[in-house]
Image: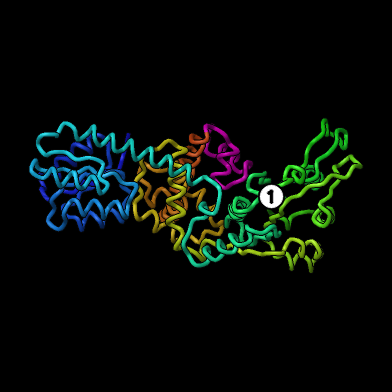
Amino acid sequence: MSGNILIIDDEIKLLKLLGMILSQENFNVKEASTARSAMTMLEQYDFDVVLSDVRLPDAFGVELVRSIKTKYPQLEIILMTAFGNITDAVQAMKNGAYDYLVKGDDNEKIIPLVYKALEKVKDNKSRIVQQIVTKGFDQIIGKSPLILQSKKLAEKVALTDAAVLLTGETGTGKEVFASAIHEGSDRKKNSFVAINCSAFSKEILESELFGHKQGAFTGALKDKKGLIEEANGGTLFLDEIGEMPIELQAKLLRVLETREFIKMGETKVSRSDFRLIAATNRDLEGEIKQGNFREDLYFRLNVFEITLPALRDRKEDLKALAKNFVDIFSHKLHLSSVQVDPDYYKALEKNDWKGNIRELRNAVERSLILMDNNILDAESLPHYSEKNAKESDSLSIRSLEKIHIQKVLQYTKGNKAEAARLLEIGIATLYRKLEEYGLK
């Protein structure tokens, strides 16, 4: 089990000795001789365990524990104390320390105790990941004024049954908002049903929405319940509504006006009571002028509009979002401890993120696949590495791309469709590159 350990002690010889011992156990170790320098390191790196002396030149261990746990509650702290200071150590445990060691007497306990503390950190992180993936407004991350305003509007409209139109660029989190609105409504005990209107042909989209009877068209081998029916009592989320064919728009409008629909190949009228949330990255008013979108449907959809901000306009949220994705994908990849270099976040901030949160999510996932020695740094970012490669020569670009593709394919266990998604290229492009680089 790897982990990020911070050792704090003003006895330099002991500090170096402990650093060497823990490094030999394959821990990532940093050292500090004062509380002030330790707090600076805690701001820069993501540590799992702190091993600290009770008495430091500029701090008292009991108070230091309280300060660290208040600011970094996920950390576990092990105190080292002289025999006569055990009372201080016990008091520090009341302030949140994990355990304490008596210097000289408990040296053989250091490694096992660090491993136990890391196990607790790992368990806590697993619980945090579970909280991250739970539904509701808590999953909307960020403290910037723009995202807080959008969240406030969503929380208010969730209490009603009004139709909601979510607008904003691709990747800004429209489905997350739609899910949160559903979870904040009286309909949360029923289904939240979502479909991307741009992902299907007209015929398939109609079948998915309205359902069909056996034999309604070639390939309709059995009855199929549509999403409108599935959403009865709950919420129907239509993503990329601006991509819906004009013929289907008329049918959807009728459903919204009457709450009645007819399955493909059937004559019987069915009813469904659902709340509609739609989303688009298009200018629907512009689409109306061009004849691509029905004005009457637009008014039905746009009872309450919420515009989600682009990531480049809320960069103060970028670090929190990135940390969230690091936790999620570290858990998914079974990485017990990942050290994030401050330069990693600085490199993220240099990107314009035209794909917004979705692009950031993919970048963090790729970074964790590409990183070395469990350390996320600027070089782990594909965009950053590619930029540096271009500044040197074209051969390094080809070499980098080949290694990049190899690592991603190893991660997806050869699943080319998933690899193409992570690489943000088409499946045909991936096959061409596999042939070009002689990869199998």
Q: Residues within 10 Å of mark 1 (few under 14, many from 20)?
A: many
Task: Give percent across and percent down for residue 74.
Answer: 34, 47
The magenta span reads 413-440
Q: Is residue 310 above or below residue 263?
A: below
Task: Give percent across and percent down for residue 293.
Answer: 79, 62
Q: Is residue 97 visible?
A: yes
Q: State the image quarter where residue 209 is shown.
A: top right
What is the count of numbered marks? 1
- According to the image, what is the colour scheme of the structure? rainbow
Does 378 sit left or right of 173 as displayed?
A: left
Quadrant in the picture for the C terminus: top right
> Residue farthest to the right?
267
Q: Which residue: 43% across, 55% down?
A: 320
Q: Mark 1 falls on what kind of element?
A: strand
Q: Which residue: 77% across, 62% down?
A: 300
Does 214 sit left or right of 226 as displayed?
A: right
Q: Nearer the viewer, residue 200 or 71?
A: 71
Q: Nearer the viewer, residue 205 or 408?
A: 205
Which residue carries the number 1 mark?
A: 235
Q: Nearer the viewer, residue 97 or 116?
A: 97
- The residue type indicated by label 1 comes to Thr
Say whether residue 439 is magenta.
Answer: yes
Q: Which secondary structure dominates the residues rendered in magenta?
A: helix
Q: Is residue 44 visible?
A: no
